[in-house]
Every structure is written in C-alpha cells, then in structure tokens.
C-alpha cells in the first residue's frame, strides 16, 4: 500500500494534528519550567494541571497494579457494570476488532476491570500498562481518556501528545462515564484505545452510544426490581387507612405514595430524600414533618405526621454583602456581625453545637462558653425563642441560606447556577476562625468548579465577583476563549495589564 493511502484525509486529520502540535509545544514548555502550559483544549489543560499536582512524571510512565487477576475476577462479579459488558462489547465490536484497538471498561476509580481485544493487541496493552487490575486514574497515569472522563465527568477523547506522559504519544483513546440510574453517581467508564495514526474520529460518538445503552439497560433492570419490591411491600401503606405515607428504597428514592390532602403534591420530594436515623422526625418540602420506619429488604415507610404545622422559614443572605441580611417568615431581622457568624455556624452544623464548640469556632482557643451563651440569648431576642434549640444549640426552622445553596449547586454539578448565586465571599467582614475557613473553602470550590467545568458565561460571571476580579489565571483563560471581536475581550486585556503590574 502506498504511503498516501494510509494517511487520513486532510479534513479528518487537520484538527487532531493541530492539537498534537500544540500539545508537543506545551510539553516542551512545561519541561523547560513553565508551570501553566497552554493547550488548545481546556479539558486537556485542566487534566494536565491536575496530573502535575498529583506529581505524575511526564517523562516516565508509572501505571500502578492495584489488584492481581484473581482479585479482579472477584471485583468484577459484584460490579454493577458486569451485567452490561456484553451489551457494550456488542455495540463496539466493529471498532474493538480493528487492528491494535482495545476495549476497556473501568470502575469509578479508574481501575481496569475488563480489557478486550485481539491477543497480540492485549500483549501490547500489557506493555503499556493497560491491563486488568491497573489503575488509569489521572493521579496515577496522568491525562488519558478514562481518567480524565472520570475527573471531568464527561465524554473525552485524548489524542496522541495530549497524553501528559510522553510514552503514550502514539496512542489515542475515547472514553465516556457510565452513571448509576439509581444514585446518579458515576460507576465506571467505557473506553476504546488504539494507535493515533488509525484512530477513527467517530470513535467517541460510538463510545458515548455504548455508555448510553449501558445506562438504559441498568435503568430497565432498576425498574423491574422496583416493581418486584413494590409488590412485596405494598400492604404496608394499605394498613394505614387514610394516613399519608410513602414507600422509599434503601437509597431514599420514592417508590409509591399514599396521599391524603395535598401531601403528595406539596410535601414529599418527587424523587429522593435523605435518610436519617430510623424513628427520627424529618422535615418535608412543605415544612411539615414525617417519620421513617424501617421495612424488610432495606426499604423505608415514611409516615406523615398528622396535624403538623409548617415551620418558620429563616432566610440568610450572607454572600458578598457589607452587612448581613436575614428574614424570618419574610420579616427583616436586624443582625450584628456576631449574630450572623452564629447563624452561619449553626446552618453549617444542623445537628447542633455546644457552647464550647461555638466559642472555639468564633474566637479561637481564647473563646469562652459564657460569652457565647450571652450572644445566643441576644440572638434569641432578635429572632424568637422557638427558632433556636438548646443542648446543643441548633436551628429549629426551615433554612434558606445563599451559601448553603451554592454548596448544594456545586455538589450537584450545577456550576453555572452556583456561580450566578455566588455574589462574593461569605461574611467578608468576619474574622471568626471557622467562618474564615468556610469562606476560603467556598471561594476555592467555586473557583475550581469554574476553571474545571464552567462555560464562558460562568467564567465571566465569576470574573465579576470580588474574588474573580483579581484572578490572573481566570483572566488568561477568558482571553484565550473569547474571540477578539467580543466586547469583553478589551476589558479583560486591560484587566490583565493592570494585574500584571
């Protein structure tokens, strides 16, 4: 075959080849001491940064063998992806059977559980470290499709020199996370790895399709299990007469509801609720209460507490404001900074804190419980005695706090929503040790999420906060992403010049 016949068409190869050139230049710059090499794709830049922070050596591959084959076999038997590997194999068989291509399935930690391909290809994979029982998380082997897909929680293709470790330059890989339909958590990845020179640009869509098929199959199995479970335990709500109740799975998913009045519509979560200790009263969406009773098979019966009145709502606006603001059932509450600090700590610890713990959190080692008791007494007068409980001190009200909302949005991957809700640092005037620590952690979490997963609008929104306005790395990222004609480009260029000074 002529050399020209083996070469991919120009339209297919142009973008990957440009990426390879950019990545090689970035590696050379990095090896010469550049701590922040610039690559053409942000997902790769972020992965290099995480890998280097984990002390991955770009000049020496070091895949780690975590389990021997016998142990891998045991892990596979109990892994939720075991049931769908044949489906994945069938979807990707046409690609996996290409010369020197491997089909790989990992768990959520990047451990290779299944590696399939022709025998000679498997030997090549073993030489690379791409074998069952070896970990391909970013902190182990650097940037690669499996590890980066897990870290970024998205489908990823890593081509040739985009691998951080130079020994993998001749290879390309495409991977997609697979999520548990019950919890929504990532439980593994599906990956195709092969030589970069023959890697098909349509491999990634095929891998995504295989992951989606796997998730659909897992969902179908879940629905069948739910039905069988419901048939076994449905007599429990029936014995309650007209009392409102719900059946929950062991993970808190709502299976069925027996409603009296408007409870189903307003009170119960539509899909899932956290499960506290059995017998404990739990707050429902409408502010009323219910109690959990354990059933056979790890399920729960949630009974509505008859005659329960909705609790008061305490709203806190503590982000970015020179003065903290609070409202109790819509009524403004005058707060001192110290009272706002107390409410922040109690909001962060719904289980409650004793006076000594609050004293340390507010004043450090020099704090005294007697001082805290006096402040709590004044705070009770500003609110009302029913809002604050004793022994330990805790909030006995529904809570709507902007800093808790941002935390929850980040935890759920809603980066854009979190950035727009983040108006600035938590209680910026506070010097209380525990508040200062939470302020720094929240700011760092928002910034990290914006740089790793945020889109242009999210980055621009964060750049408008007091923290983002002085962030040179964020400014550089935006300048690389925004086209020159974008009106924001000029403002960012001026900001970069000012920050550089």
Image: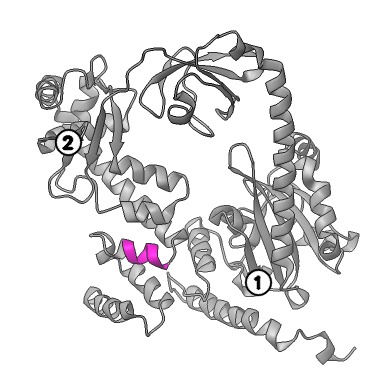
Q: Secondary structure at mark 1?
A: strand
Say which label, 2 or 1, has the lower sequence index. Answer: 1
Residue at the image position 16 percent from the left and 41 percent from the top:
325
Residue at the image position 74 percent from the left and 36 percent from the top:
221
The answer to whether 29 is drawn above or below residue 131 in the figure is below
The answer to whether 152 is drawn above or below residue 488 in the figure is above
Q: In terms of image quadrants, where is residue 415?
A: bottom left
Q: Which residues are magenta?
A: 456-461
Residue 454 picture location, percent across and down:
44, 61
Marks 2/1: CA–CA distance: 51 Å
Front residue of 177/364: it is 177
Front residue of 450/208: it is 208
Residue at the image position 50 percent from the left and 12 percent from the top:
243
Q: In terms of image quadrants, where is residue 248?
A: top right
Residue at the image position 58 percent from the left and 57 percent from the top:
154
Q: Secondary structure at mark 2?
A: helix
Q: How many residues crowd around disc 1 within 10 Å: few (fewer than 14), some, or many (20 or more)?
A: many
Residue 351 picture location, percent across and down:
34, 23
Q: In terms of image quadrants, where is residue 262?
A: top left
| Extreme residue toward the front, this view | 261
Front residue of 465/354: it is 465
Q: Which mark is residue 340?
A: 2
Q: Is residue 21 left or right of residue 74?
A: left
Q: How many residues crowd around disc 2 within 10 Å: few (fewer than 14), some, or many (20 or more)?
A: many
Q: Is residue 155 left or right of residue 72?
A: left
The residue indicated by pointer 1 is 159
Q: Is residue 413 visible?
A: yes
Magenta segment main secondary structure: helix
Decide whether residue 460 is among the magenta residues: yes
């Amino acid at each position: 075959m002529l050399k020209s016949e083996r070469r991919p068409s120009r339209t297919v190869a142009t973008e990957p080849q440009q990426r390879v050139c950019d990545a090689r230049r970035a590696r050379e710059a990095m090896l010469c001491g550049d701590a922040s090499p610039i690559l053409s794709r942000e997902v790769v830049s972020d992965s290099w940064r995480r890998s280097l922070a984990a002390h991955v050596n770009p000049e020496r591959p070091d895949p780690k063998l975590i389990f021997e084959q016998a142990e891998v076999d045991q892990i596979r038997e109990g892994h939720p992806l075991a049931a769908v590997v044949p489906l994945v194999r069938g979807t990707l068989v046409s690609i996996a059977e290409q010369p020197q291509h491997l089909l790989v399935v990992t768990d959520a930690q990047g451990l290779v559980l299944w590696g399939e391909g022709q025998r000679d290809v498997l030997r090549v994979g073993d030489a690379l470290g791409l074998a069952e029982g070896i970990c391909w998380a970013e902190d182990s082997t650097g940037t690669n499709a499996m590890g980066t897909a897990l870290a970024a929680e998205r489908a990823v293709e890593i081509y040739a020199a985009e691998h951080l470790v130079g020994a993998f330059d001749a290879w390309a890989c495409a991977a997609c996370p697979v999520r548990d339909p019950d919890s929504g958590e990532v439980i593994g990845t599906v990956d195709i790895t092969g030589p970069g020179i023959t890697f098909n640009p349509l491999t990634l869509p095929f891998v995504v399709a295989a992951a989606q098929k796997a998730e659909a199959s897992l969902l179908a199995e879940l629905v069948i299990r739910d039905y069988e479970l419901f048939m076994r335990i449905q007599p429990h709500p029936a014995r309650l007469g007209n009392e409102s109740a719900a059946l929950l799975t062991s993970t808190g998913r709502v299976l069925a509801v027996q409603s009296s009045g408007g409870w189903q519509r307003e009170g119960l979560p539509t899909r899932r609720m956290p499960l506290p200790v059995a017998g404990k009263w739990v707050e429902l969406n409408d502010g009323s209460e219910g109690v959990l009773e354990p059933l056979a098979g790890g399920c729960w019966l949630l009974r509505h507490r008859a005659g329960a009145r909705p609790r008061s709502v305490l709203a806190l606006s503590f982000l970015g404001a020179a003065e903290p603001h609070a409202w109790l059932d819509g009524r403004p509450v005058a707060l001192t900074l110290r009272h706002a600090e107390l409410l922040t700590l109690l909001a962060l610890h719904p289980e409650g804190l004793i006076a000594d713990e609050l004293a340390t959190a507010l004043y450090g080692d020099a704090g005294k419980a007697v001082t805290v008791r006096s402040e709590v007494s004044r705070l009770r007068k500003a609110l009302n005695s029913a809002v604050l409980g004793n022994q330990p001190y805790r909030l006995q009200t529904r809570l709507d706090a902007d800093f808790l909302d941002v935390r929850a949005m980040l935890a759920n991957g809603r980066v854009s929503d979190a950035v727009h809700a983040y108006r600035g640092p938590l209680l910026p005037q506070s010097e209380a040790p525990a508040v200062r620590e939470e302020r720094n952690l929240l700011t760092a979490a928002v910034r990290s999420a914006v740089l790793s997963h945020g889109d242009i609008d999210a980055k621009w929104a964060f750049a408008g906060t007091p923290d983002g306005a002085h962030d040179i790395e964020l400014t550089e990222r935006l300048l690389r992403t925004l086209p020159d004609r974008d009106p924001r480009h000029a403002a960012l260029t001026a900001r970069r010049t000012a920050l550089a000074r």
